[in-house]
Amino acid sequence: MTRPTVLLAALAASLVVPAAAQAKDLYAVFQTSRGAIGVKLLPEKAPKAVENFVGLAQGKKAWTDPATGKQVTQPLYDGTLFHRVIPGFMIQGGDPLSRGAALGETSSASGRPFGTGDPGFRFADELEKPPAKPFAKPCQLAMANSGPNTNGSQFFITEAATPWLDPKACGAPGGACGYVHFGEGVCGCELVAPIARAGNGQTKLVKVTITEKAPTCK
């Protein structure tokens, strides 16, 4: 084997990614006061959204507590409420203002309504181009927002197919508007309907666990 051939063979071998080094599946388990919902996260579609969600869930990413104005590094989602629910549509949670609130409460001690809290930062959209249809199936996980590039900590899980949420062409940077889709349900999706029908703030998100093992929700 000539020297150039040897060098090419060595280069080709170095470009082979060992199976153990390949990306592993990542899941989030939403342990609610009514049971567990398991979701497979989609970092290949929305890496920033997944990184943000995982960091906040595990308490590894700093955020600003809207109740105190102080920066903290602790799990954001544990002890929050599903503060906004719509039967037949979706359940929404992730407002740090609702941390520690009793079931049925709709605002903080200062009177600020749940749903207006955020982690003190926003990040950009990661949207598929139309005519992508990420919301063609039930039990999809996405970031809630108040317009283009306003993602923070709030999220929602759909109860049914919601095609009107699919990305639409618009004049925003990137050319699309919509909701960042970053997960899909794998178990416990039957709980979305009773949570939605229980009413705003009637279900607690006890804990979010991040795992590489596919959950069974039993």
Image (spheres, rainbow, N blue to C red):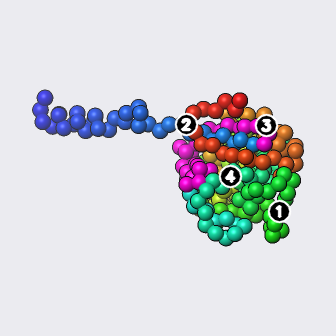
Left or right of 195 on screen, residue 134: left
State the CA–CA distance, disc 2 to disc 4. Answer: 19 Å
Front label number (4 vs 3): 4
Identity of the amino acid at label 4? Tyr
Q: CA distance from mark 2 to mark 1?
A: 35 Å
Q: The residue tagged with tag 2: helix, strand or loop?
A: loop
Q: Amino acid at mark 3?
A: Leu
Q: Which amino acid lies under the numbered mark 2 shown in the image of this protein?
A: Glu
Residue 122 place in picture, x, y as percent:
62, 63
User: From the viewer's perspective, is 68 left or right of 45?
Assistant: right
- Give the labeled residue for mark 3: 191
Q: Residue at x 63, y 65 (%)?
A: 64
Residue at 71% x, 41% y: name it: 31
Residue 160 visible in the picture:
no
Nearest to N terminus: mark 2 or mark 4: 4
Q: Say which label, 2 or 3, has the lower sequence index.
A: 3
Give the CA separation, mark 4 to mark 3.
18 Å
On residue 212, the disc is: 2
Name the residue carrying label 1.
107
Q: Which residues are magenta?
A: 33-60
Q: Which quadrant of the rendered structure holds the C terminus?
A: top right
Q: Secondary structure at mark 1?
A: loop
User: What's the residue type where badge 1 is placed?
Assistant: Ser
Horizontal and vertical percent for residue 36?
72, 37
In the rendered image, residue 49 lying in the magenta stretch gets the answer yes
Per the rendering, the mark at residue 77 is: 4
Front-lying residue, 173 or 197? 197
Secondary structure under tag 4 reads: loop
How packed is label 1: few (under 14 Cα within 10 Å), some, or many (20 or more)? some
